[in-house]
Amino acid sequence: MSAGVGGSRAGASGLAIETSGLTKHFGRQAAVDGVDLAVPAGTVFGFLGPNGSGKTTTIRMLLGLAAASAGTVKLLGASMPGELHKVLPRVGALVEGPGFYPFLSGAANLHRMDAAGPHTVPATRKLRVGQALERVGLAHSAGKKVHAYSLGMKQRLGIAGALLSARDLLVLDEPTNGLDPQGTREVRNLIRALSHDGTTVFVSSHLLAEVEQMCTHAAVMSSGRLVAQGPLADLRREGTVRIRLETPDAALGRQELVRLGLVPAADTLEPGGDGVQVLAALPASAGPAVPALLPEDIVAHLVAAGVRVRGFGVERESLEDRFVALTGEGFDVAG
Amino acid sequence: MLPVDATAKPPRGSAWSLLGSELKVLFGRRRTWALLLALAAIPVLIAVAVRLSSTVPAGRGPAFLDRISQNGLFVAFTAMLVSVPLFLPLTVGVVAGDTIAGEASHGTLRYLLVAPAGRIRLLLVKYAGALAFCVVAPLAVALAGGAIGAALFPVGPVTLLSGDVIQPPEAALRILLIAAYLAVSLAGLSAIGLFLSTLTVVPVGAMAATVVVSVVSQILGQLPQLEWLHPWLFSHYWLGFGDILRQPVLWDSFASNAVLQAGYVAVFGALAYGRFATKDILS
């Protein structure tokens, strides 16, 4: 992909998206509350959060569709919405599902979308529309009216709309919504390929697995607040680590673990057989000066103390556990 | 990935692309053609009804009706007169009310703005599309009227309101002038529709509201108690195209109408801009 329309791909800070204190009130309620996003250029950035956590509202403010109640947005180094006309031609977007004229064909819809841009070149429009349709696998349905499209086809057409020109940043709101597993995989590959070409991809999703599979970075929203963000590896590391001890001497084992500074879970689990399982969280490292407690040292200490160790393991909290811990469990849609 | 190397040559976009696209979408829609066909059906119905009845008593029915059987050109005059109070405002209400709300309901508004079409540019293009319909709608009535009139009745010299007689080619020109008069008459209503369309994401609501406004304006225009208000109603000159049927043409009402409509366009255009420029697009 060629470099964008003049200028750098990101601000001096190397961030493709940068918000500070971004807030949106609807009436008294804050749908988005003091969000400080920092999306490094060149990353595939997952924007995670349950339904109703403020993801789409944030995206609307990023793209200048809605005005922020407070805070600032910088897109590719340009402030929004002030420099909207300069920056948006370099941004492809899929916002809250595709939107098309049902009475026009897929290709005609893309033609219109492209014609809406003030700087798109009419001479190459047909070619670019054809290529975008090709990329999302809709070349054969290009002439069909959109009302005859399935949900997945509309979604693909929406993604094609974001790819009509060379883009430096793609903002894709739930891009795999309504797609079959095959389509989901294709979108994932497409995003990887685009990222490989140097495009920053900002993908919102409520599906953790999806983000885990294609993103390098992620941010987590909960009830309008940004509760975590960073490289995916760091987010994983931030989760607590715990050990699992299988022993018939549960009481003694607990006692020794506490002495080592671990925090055993209140209940012991019966894994069957004559042993019991003790789970204990490793304390967060007190700093670089304090050497970390190594699993083998724990085992050595337990054995020396007379605890019969039948099984021992270190479990890192999965990203899913972390996600649930950050956003709360259950199906309640955040108000 | 794409052959467009934006760095090699400066982007040569066209500001007119969107207007072209708008007109293509508007006049490529089946609904627009249905509206125009419905308008064209009015003169056809009138002509057929007159043809099938033996005589039309003079002085009954719409003006000019009794003259149709002697001169087919009067089908066009009659049909335009008949369509002014309701049919033309109805179709214009549908098109103008749909401008922004229709895009919002399709979910295309956000994509147009992200393109970025620019809010002012989009509003102007949308209004231009509505105006184009205002030009085409009376033309549909006039052309269908002329065609069906010529097909079913003899065509001959037309006696004007001033008593002068003009030949058919000049009469055809007068018919087109009346169509232009009606197009100007509908400009204000279109601006009102555009404004109402920025208030909602339900196009039917904006359409209905626009039509209601046109009806209310005409009702107010009939109440003698509100005479002070009448010159300010956008429908005040709607039926004032009789001056075009004089020799020489009296342009007074055409000019007054144009000024009045321009005022409405300015006021409601500004309101639409004020609303749309800062509106949160949440649809």
Image (spheres, rainbow, N blue to C red):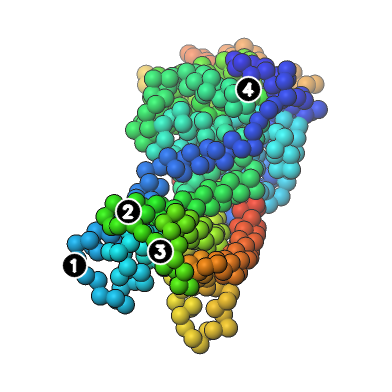
Q: Evaluate whether residue A243 shows in this view.
A: no
Dot 1: what SS?
loop
User: Residue at position x 44%, y 66% from top?
Assistant: B165
Q: Residue furthest bottom?
A: B225
Pointer 2 local density, CA inside 10 Å: few below 14, some 14–19, many at least 20 = some
> Which kind of residue does numbered mark 4 sit on?
Ala
* Of the image marks 2 and 1, the number of the one nearer the N terminus: 1
Work out whether disc 1 and disc 4 sit on a shared chain.
no
The chain under label 4 reads A
A85 to A213, vertically: above or below: below
For marks 2 and 4, give the one nearer the viewer: 2
Residue at mark 4 = A166
Q: Position of residue B105 (x, y in %)?
A: 46, 48
Judge by depth and name the residue closer to the eye, B163 or A206: B163
Residue at mark 1 = B54
The chain under label 1 reads B
* Of the image marks 1 and 3, the number of the one nearer the N terminus: 1
The chain under label 2 reads B
State the mark number for residue B150. Answer: 2
Quarter occupied by the N terminus of chain B: top right
